[in-house]
Image (cartoon, rainbow, N blue to C red):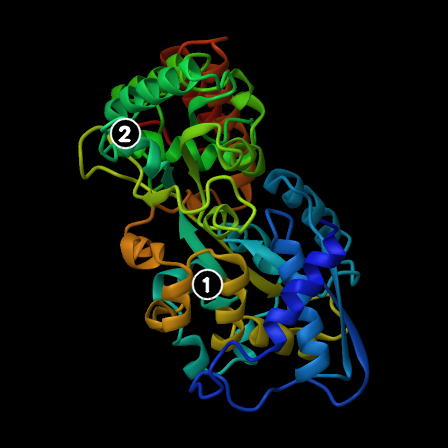
Amino acid sequence: MSKRFVVLLIAAALMVGLVPTASAQEGDVWCGTDEPVSITWIAGTVGNEYETAVALAEKYMAEACPNVTVKVVERPTSTTETIAQYQQFFEGQSSEIDVYQLDVFYPAMFKEHLVDISEYATDEFLALFFPAVLDAYTIEGRVVGLPWFAGGGMLFYRSDLLEKYGLAVPQTWDELAAAAKTIQDGERAEGNAAFWGFVFQGKAYEGLTCDALEWQVSYGGGRILSPEGVIEVNDPASIEIFDKIASWVGDIVPPDVLNYQEEDSRAVWQAGNAAFMRNWAYAYPLGQAEDSPIRDKFGVGPLPGKEAGMSAATLGGWGVGVSRYSQNVEAASAFAIWVTSYDQLVDFHLARGEQPVQPALYQDAQLLEALPYLASMGNVLESAIARPGVAGVQYNAVSELYYTAVNNVLAGSVDAETAMADLELAMADLGFELP
């Protein structure tokens, strides 16, 4: 299926009136200008994110602000590569991009390059968001981005296979390993040699930072950096869980996981070749697509922990922010506000899944019908763990050191005790405090 065809399908869904028009969140659309202008939005890449962004832009031009032309360009697949590209644009003070899609930890890195959008959005509008999520985009009192979607890491499980083998949804990592082995052995014995017990994001990139942070916190370990900037990686709990996960690679986890990003994991999972998957909520509606081999055969829930109830979920999600170097700041800000307004977020989640950033959306009948996991997951945003924003402009360097060290452990080239001791010293060299 071509990207253009998918865009047309999503655009059609957005334009047929799926959402109630009575919304206290909306009001008259503000376009930021009465003159014809053109703005560029860099967005999308994972799953149908880009196609959904294009469809929203087309709806904006067709229904909301015909005088504003919105061009959508696709960001790199890797978050790490996205950071590098954004740095090039910002350091060059480029006006090429007006609206940026911002990962939840970007604001501290790029704060000086982004407009304070609270100068254009009303207090009533800003109050619609979860305070904790909006806070992630608020730096030194400046709202440098608006939340678009959020979420935490989730455990996807094959409910049909759990029933087939008489197993319960695992609550601990040891339970997951045992269930994964049982199901994997059974499915392979029935002829599916490509079946694996568990897939996740194991490539040396930002996605592994998210996965590994969940592992160590759910096992009673630290959080990479404390709020005060103290290094929290070299502790017995973190070392134990990293070695445990590494022991699974080649056993219940495919060796290729060392190169898996989100879409690689989902490809294995959605093909029906994994019992469990760690991923984000976007994978839910894709797994439920009419042509999906696992449609109506899976469920989602919290990730396991060392013990039941010790689940941890890395705070994920993206927002939108406006470049200080845009030649059309008001039009770009108006578009950012529109994209993150209630009705457009309903449209977005119907097409894309993910977890909403406004509490009212969790009561929306359409979303609850289309995305039943919202009710079963509860509000993960209240217990999600943020990546160490205290690192500020050094975040990318910290994350690269961290995910590289963990990837080396998974690859078996070093044990976790040695890797975490070396990582601790490397982070100290960046100026962070030793415990």
Query: In the rendered image, which residue does mark 1 sit on?
Result: 140
Check disc 2 and report the residue beneath it: 221
Residue 152 visible to an observer of this rendering: yes
In this rendering, the label closer to the viewer, 1 or 2: 2
Q: Secondary structure at mark 2?
A: loop
Residue nearest the observer in this picture, 152 or 350? 350
Residue toward you, 293 or 366: 293
What residue is shown at x 67% (from left), y 57% (from top)?
51
Q: Amino acid at mark 2?
A: Gly
**49 is higher (above) or lower (below) than 248:** below
Q: Is residue 150 left or right of residue 304?
A: right
Quarter of the figure that contains the C terminus: top left
Using the rendered image of the protein, determine whether residue 230 is visible from the camera's viewpoint.
Answer: no
Circle 1 crowding by C-alpha within 10 Å: few under 14, some 14–19, many from 20 = few
Relative placement, left or right, of 282 versus 156 is right
Q: Position of residue 385 (x, y in %)?
A: 34, 45
Of callouts 1 and 2, the N-terminal one: 1
